[in-house]
Amino acid sequence: MSTPEKDKTRKFRAAKRMREIMTEYYIDAKSAVQTGRKVAWITSGGPVEPLIVMDVIPVYPENYGAMIGASHMGGDLCSKAEALGYSTDLCSYARADIACAIENGGPIGGLPRPDMLICCNNICGTVLKWYEIHARYFNVPLFIFDTPFCHTEFPEIARRYVRSQLDEYVSFLEGVCGRPFDLEKSREVGALSLQGQRLWQAVLDTAAHRPAPMTAFDAFFFLALIVTLRGTKTVVDFYQELLAEMNERIDRGIWAIPNERYRLLWDNLPVWYRLKWLSETFEAHDACLVADTYTTAWCGSMKYIDENNFFDSMAEAYTRIYLNIGIDEMVKTIYTMIDKYEVDGMVMHSNRSCKPYSFGQYDIQKMIQEHKGIPCMVIESHMTDERSFSESQTATRIDAFMEMIKQKKG
Amino acid sequence: MRTAGIDIGSITAKAAIMENGAVLGTRVIFTGYNVEIASRKVYDELLAELDMPGSAVEKIISTGYGRNSVPFAHKAMTEIICHGTGAHFLRNDIRTVIDVGGQDSKAMVVDGSGMVRDFVMNDKCAAGTGRFLEVMARALEVNLDDFGAQSLKAANASRISSICTVFAESEVISLISKGESRENIIAGIHDSVASRVYAMAQRIKASAPIMMTGGVAKNIGVVRALEKKFNTAIEVNEYAQVNGAIGAAVLAARL
């Protein structure tokens, strides 16, 4: 274990700033009624930029789900949802969030009431029913942004279909807000969104350095801003600051895992209520989780964005995100990451909550072992429901996996 | 060089003492409530049996679920690596080890030098484990030690379709009430365990020669059912139950 002195230098300055930004953001959202602004609840992979253009405050039940998980409130809230009749097989974000809305509980005293709901199904199909439940419960308008699944390509017919929904989305926002959509501001927001994504990718890329200045556990924390406030200057300024801090760490030789010997890639959402335990368990093996497919997803489809026409190209970028593509495409992304970050093994979280993320993991595992020759391990859990986590089973798997890597690598 | 391996499982605690590549002795006791006491007890009993002072053993590795609660061990390693090493020690051409213990089942692929190349464990479910068999033995009022022999007398194995221990138990009870013979039900239970374990082992491309270790390897019914699934003979060594402890003792010599 690290000494207090070491912990002090290893703490990120930017963490304090991020907490301030998130606090301000939630205060803004919770006082929206007083300030006359509107609040939209939106899915984590949904196109948020039009909301920023309209000065609507985006609120993310999924970000809130992560907060619930990290504060160990998931199990209780999931039980409440189960008592309301929701199945234990349902996503634990959905269960916890529905319970919070109905019970008026959860961290920070619950989320501010929505004026509208924006549901984009590029991340899963559960969100459709989840948001319909909220629409009925809060009796507010719901906009569904439907992104067809892209096995390998994005056909013209899909482009036209998704693009036409952007117009409908704008009309919907104009209707709810009662004012026109500002095209000039849309260009500014688009530019800031792209800039934010580029900076986030640059931050994650610093972990390609051996040893790495950050771990995936840090990325899980710093992710919140690119998810929630994408398209604002706050995000750009913050990630510039964070990137500078990462580079400074590299210059000064401050490493996330002081004796980094093994580099691992994480797949799927974090186990929010076990971040500290997992991070310490891997650190005890001198293993650094240098990258993950999850936080990369918020800059993974930048390649489809046309910087001169952000608005139109959003159709493709939002449709071809990591969870809305076939396994062949997913695996290509993973191969690139394995090479870029020079990883020795892959840790897959088979997450009973997130079916689209977990389905296919065993096939991906086989493909990786065949093509890249690196070992993969699987941890079984729910991202927010701590009742489904088995510590000793997980510890044995991690220890055995690390023993195997050590035997292989020496 | 004398070394020891202590394997603390969920049901039994095992110890093995070795000297220069030969097994001097092994011992198995019930783990009970206190892991630390169990580890001390099984080791002391084995030392006494071998009439050997503790100081005669140079290095000790602990393994199994209680591996971190063995205060006198020099190092803790997982049972996955230990079973791989133990199986390789007992028969060096083994390529797959299937370990079915009290609370979990695992399969490991081992290379020519005894290194574990891949492994898989059962998910959070007791089906396909020794505990599943214990529950069923209780429901059928049969001594677990007789399970294997009884199932070999089955005319037609019953079909147990549920993979959940609790549901499977009620399925067994309904088979009993339908008048199905004990032997057939037990054979069905063994098929059910074998199916789970086989499906799991397929994930890591298990290949022959296969060795089965762990307490459940003592059950001839499960072994035969697995042989049918894999369509090959499965090696069960006299040391099957203490294989993890032997592997730990082999590894201790490398410390």
Image (cartoon, rainbow, N blue to C red):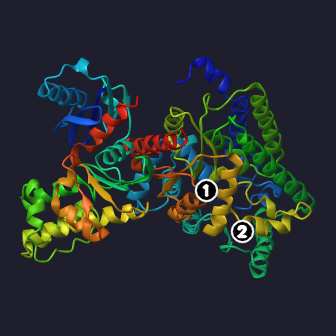
Q: Please tell me whether mark 1 sits on a helix, a strand or a loop.
A: helix
Q: Mark 1 points at which residue?
A: A372
Q: Contact, CB < 8 Å: mark 2 with mark 1?
A: no
- Relative height, residue A344 to residue A268 (above, below): above
Residue A126: image location, x then y, percent: 55, 66
Q: Which of marks 2 and 1 is in front?
A: 1
Residue ID at (88%, 54%): A191
- Which mark is first along the chain, 1 or 2? 2
Identify residue type, mark 1: Lys
Q: Residue A319 — which label? A: 2
Which of the chains bears the disc numbered 2?
A
**Is disc 1 on the same chain as disc 2?**
yes
Q: Dot 2 lies on which element?
A: helix
Q: Where is residue A65 in the image (x, y as percent from the top left)?
A: 56, 50
Residue drawn at point x = 28 percent, y = 47 percent: B90
Q: Which mark is residue B243?
A: none
Q: Which residue is drawn at 22% across and 57% down?
A: B132
Answer yes or no: is residue B202 visible.
Answer: yes
* Left or right: A93 in relation to B91: right
Residue A135 image offset from top left, x and y in percent: 59, 65
Q: How many circles with numbers are drawn on the protein?
A: 2
Is A198 situated above or below B196? above
Q: Nearer the viewer, residue B177 or A101?
A: B177
